Image (cartoon, grey):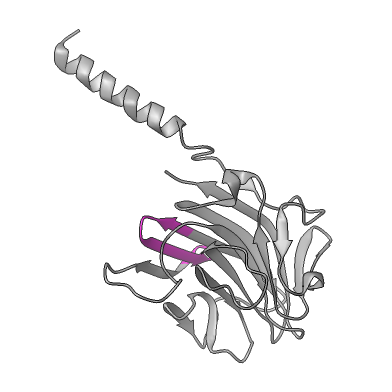
Amino acid sequence: MTRKLMLVLALAGLFLSGCQMIPGMGKWYSLFDGKTLNGWKASENKDTFTVSDGTIVAHGPRSHLFYVGSVNNADFKNFEFKADVMTTPGSNSGIYFHTEYQEKGWPGKGFECQVNTTHTDPKKTGGLYSVQDVMNDAPSKDNEWFHYYIKVEGKHVIIKIDGKTTVDWTQPDNWEMGGRKIDHGTIALQGHDPKSIVYYKNIMIRPLP
């Protein structure tokens, strides 16, 4: 065996051992068991979130449901996320990433991926809220399930709705927007207002290196 080949094998071994140190890398994990809210913690209005027919239902006064379970210790930096979502007429919601639990108010940390088909807010499903919005025409339809995909890698964010890219954004080096910055943290679902009813199921995440 040549010295060059030995060096290549040694470097490959270091790379693989480093990868193995990242828990769950490359594997999809379910964040919702379809029966309970185990692993989740709701803020202010706890009853806004319930489970019905294998779905998480967001319906009630403002509240946010934060993932606090065991997958990656509820702390994600680079990841792929997917879920099936259904809105009802006039409803608003959102999926937060790189956030953290807070008892009251709109989350001060992290980004919101918008869920809104026909609510009066012109920022629609598939947008990165107030960063790269989908304006006026939603790629989703009320009362129909759609597939929501989010990928965060480095400072790059991709959002897809039913396989169609709606956001492709890289955070600039000089980015300043308070707590809205690429960092790390958990996932949260939004209960926006008492008139909104939104459903979530098949909630999955895949940690990336």
Would you place residue 99 above or below residue 140 in this image? Answer: above
Q: Is residue 158 magenta?
A: yes
Identify the residue shown where x is 23% and y is 22%. 8
**Dominant SS type (magenta):** strand
Q: Tag count in the figure?
A: 0
Q: Is residue 2 left or right of residue 191?
A: left
Q: Position of residue 161 (x, y in %)?
A: 53, 67
Screen quadrant of the C terminus: top left
Instruction: Compare residues 86 and 115 and report the one nearer the observer.
Output: 115
Which residue in the rendered view is the most extreme toward the front? 103
Q: Position of residue 174 (x, y in %)?
A: 27, 71
- Give the camera-side residue of 42 and 156: 42
Determine the residue positioned at 61% across, 92% down: 120
163 drawn magenta: yes
Residue 162 at least partly seen: no
Quarter of the image for the N terminus: give it: top left
Q: Quadrant of residue 64?
A: bottom right
Q: Position of residue 55 (x, y in %)?
A: 77, 61
Q: Residue at x 77, y 76 (%)?
A: 59
Q: Position of residue 173 (x, y in %)?
A: 27, 67
**Image height of 120 relative to 133, above or below:** below
Q: What stretch of residues is rendered in magenta?
A: 151-164
Give 179 or 50, whichever is nearer the viewer: 179
Give the left or right position of residue 164, taking residue 121 as reference: left
Determine which quarter of the picture holds residue 84.
bottom right
Q: Residue furthest left?
A: 3
In this picture, residue 29 sits left or right of residue 38: left
For this orientation, the residue located farthest to the top is 1
Q: Is residue 92 left or right of residue 180?
A: right
Q: Residue at x 47, y 37 (%)?
A: 22
User: Can I make out residue 127 in this image?
Assistant: yes
